Image (cartoon, helix red, strand yellow):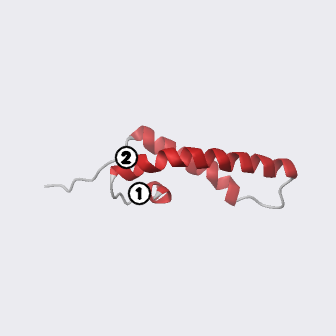
Amino acid sequence: MQDFQPQIPQELQNQANAWVARFAPLVMSDGAPTEQELRDRIRVCQELQVDGQKLRPQLQAIGDLNDPVVETFT
């Protein structure tokens, strides 16, 4: 008998991966940003906060998964 491993629905997985992809450039950039780049980053952070608050409960409801994307939100 195989162990039951819950799977993340593909659409939810895509949304979570897209969130991480939008977050990554904020922490992996080089050099000092311009004023406009800082304003853009602040806007992206605000959007990520809203989107992350929507994704977190959906991902947590799936259960204890050893998925790095799920761990990012929990």
- Residue drawn at x 48%, y 42% as measured from the top left: 14
The reply to whether discs 2 and 1 touch (Cβ–Cβ < 8 Å) is yes
Left or right, residue 14 beside residue 33: left
- Residue drawn at x 22%, y 53% as measured from the top left: 4
Q: Disc 2 to disc 1, how far (Cα)?
A: 9 Å
Would you place residue 15 above or below residue 65 in this image?
above
Q: Which quadrant, please, contains the C terminus?
A: bottom left
The residue identified by callout 1 is 67
The residue identified by callout 2 is 8
Q: Residues within 10 Å of mark 1 (few under 14, many from 20)?
A: few
Tell me where residue 20 appears, x and y as whole percent: 57, 51
The amino acid marked with disc number 1 is Asp
10 vs 71, nearest the viewer? 71
Tell me where residue 31 appears, x and y as whole percent: 82, 61
14 vs 73, nearest the viewer? 73
- Residue drawn at x 35%, y 57% as measured from the top left: 65
Left or right, residue 25 beside residue 8: right
Q: Residues within 10 Å of mark 2 (few under 14, many from 20)?
A: some
The amino acid marked with disc number 2 is Ile
Task: Write down the quadrant of residue 67 in the picture.
Answer: bottom left
- Residue drawn at x 33%, y 48% as measured from the top left: 7
- Seen as rendered, the residue at the extreme top is 11
Q: Secondary structure at mark 1?
A: loop
Tell me where residue 29 appears, x and y as whole percent: 74, 58
Q: Secondary structure at mark 2?
A: loop
Q: Which quadrant, please, contains the N terminus?
A: bottom left
Q: Which label belongs to residue 29?
A: none
The number of numbered badges drawn on the structure is 2
- Seen as rendered, the residue at the extreme left is 1
Left or right, residue 61 beside residue 29: left
Specify which label sits upstream in the sequence, 2 or 1.
2
